[in-house]
Image: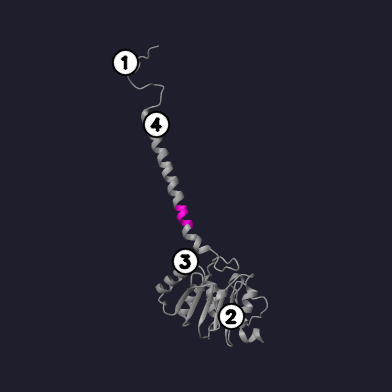
Amino acid sequence: VLVLGAPLEALQGGGRSLCGPPMSLEADCLKTRRWGLFLTGAVGGTLAALYAVATPFLMPALRRVCLPFVPATPRQVENVMKVLRGRNGPLVDIGSGDGRVVIAAAKEGFPAVGYELNPWLVWYSRYRAWREGVRDSARFYISDLWKVTFSQYTNVVIFGVPQMMPQLEKKLELELKEGARVIACRFPFPHWIPDHVTGEGIDTVWAYDVSTFRG
């Protein structure tokens, strides 16, 4: 059946087929497929890079117990500073994380030290101390707390977990000198009676004086 008004070339088969797909459509499909593969690879690579960067910050900071890095809240740091008012002498933060407690103490005039097993967090803490202008009074070391002696510190801060507190309690009781104060954040020590309690909920801090728990 002839179609009135149709070009002669189309009727004779000289033009594009009226039934088959155009060649440009196949090319467009190929380009779309290539872009899809490219975007999939880009997204996958980005996610892998983010995982590689974030994982060291979330690794357990202590080997004997699983203690992942959980940053202290501003209120927690504020409560730690409250129970340190009127005190002096060197301060140590056990498992110092990103260094915010050590830096805050250094700003208050304490010679402050942080021990942290995660090297990424130690390097980041050093950078923060430099940026905050307390590089000389806030120092950070890569070390396992069970291999450090704390006898030289007058003020001890710990963000621990319940599993580690009994053993740490014994270690500090043996090593600390008279006049020292231990500040526990998030979880109290199981056997000591605190001399001061500040804050509430996850922001609670418990302060223990050596003379009290030894007595």
Q: Amino acid at mark 2?
A: Val
**Disc 2 target residue:** 182
Magenta region includes residue 156:
no
How busy is the neighbourhood of tag 3: few (under 14 within 10 Å), some, or many (20 plus)?
Answer: some
Percent coordinates x, y for residue 145 in the rendering = 55, 74
Residue in view at x 63 percent, y 78 percent? 169
How busy is the neighbourhood of tag 2: few (under 14 within 10 Å), some, or many (20 plus)?
Answer: many
Above or below, 61 relative to 106: above
Q: Nearer the viewer, mark 2 or mark 1?
A: 2
Earlier-in-chain disc, 3 versus 1: 1
Depth check, front residue: 22 or 113: 113
Horizontal relation, residue 163 to residue 131: left or right: right
Horizontal relation, residue 118 to residue 6: left or right: right
What separation in Å lies between label 2 and label 1 (alpha carbons)? 98 Å
**Disc 4 target residue:** 26
Earlier-in-chain disc, 4 versus 2: 4
What separation in Å lies between label 4 and label 3 (alpha carbons)? 50 Å
Q: Amino acid at mark 1?
A: Leu
What separation in Å lies between label 1 and label 4 (alpha carbons)? 26 Å
| Quadrant in which residue 158 is drawn | bottom right
Tell whether label 3 touches label 4 (CB within 8 Å).
Answer: no
SS at badge 2: strand
Earlier-in-chain disc, 2 versus 3: 3
**Disc 1 target residue:** 8
Earlier-in-chain disc, 1 versus 4: 1
Percent coordinates x, y for residue 172 in the rendering = 60, 80
Stretch in magenta = 46-51
